[in-house]
Amino acid sequence: MIVAREKQQYYSLPKMPGEKKQPQSEPVRRSLKWKDKLALTGLVGLFFCSSLLIAFYFAQVLATGYLLNNTETDLVQLRKESHDLYIRVNQFTSLENVEVLAVNRLGMVKPVNDEVIMVQSVVPPKLPATASADGNGVEHELRQVTDEKREQNWVIRAFTKMVGHLEASINAG
């Protein structure tokens, strides 16, 4: 194998006889007018500002996506907790649980069928609002206060409804 040596004289072609050497032309500098420079600077500035605006909106989209993802995970946790609490409420309000609590904690005794006394509740009919003889309307005001108390005390209504279900299951069984 033969390796060629590098020689500088072979890099340029030899001059042919009668050929004139062309002078190397100097690069022509064209200067821009100040209006063109201003327009070019404005375009570069506009490109920079639009790039910043696009980056800002992209960051906003990412931040909103992050918040949305966190909110969705919080919502899933709250739904699970709500479901668990709903199950616990149903367990605590079941008639069997109420019966166990009444017998064990409150010391109540389960009645035998022949020891049950049925009490029928009597609801007085609603009378039209009339003023009393002295014209003060005290009777009407008392009736309104008792009606409001009946409507406001939903805990007592729920408890009596639950006891009614329990009585119905005892009488049926």
Image (cartoon, rainbow, N blue to C red):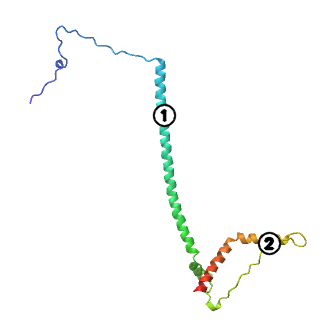
Reply above or below: 123 against 5: below
Residue at the extreme bottom of the image, as rendered: 114
Residue at 16% in and 19% down:
10
The picture quadrant where one finds residue 89 is bottom right
Q: Position of residue 23 (x, y in %)?
A: 27, 11
Amino acid type indicated by mark 1: Ser
Decide which of 167, 28 is in the foreground and name it: 167
Decide which of 59, 136 is in the foreground and name it: 136
Residue at 63% in and 92% down:
114
Label 2 belongs to which residue?
143
Numbered disc 2: secondary structure: helix
Is the residue marked by circle 2 packed among few (<14), some (14-19), or many (20+) residues within 10 Å? few
Residue at 65% in and 76% down:
159
Residue at the extreme right of the image, as rendered: 134
Q: Position of residue 67 (x, y in %)?
A: 51, 50
- Give the left or right position of residue 7, taking residue 166 as reference: left
The picture quadrant where one finds residue 164 is bottom right
Q: Quarter of the image containing the N terminus?
A: top left
The picture quadrant where one finds residue 15 is top left
Reply above or below: 66 against 10: below
Label 1 belongs to which residue?
50
Amino acid type indicated by mark 2: Arg
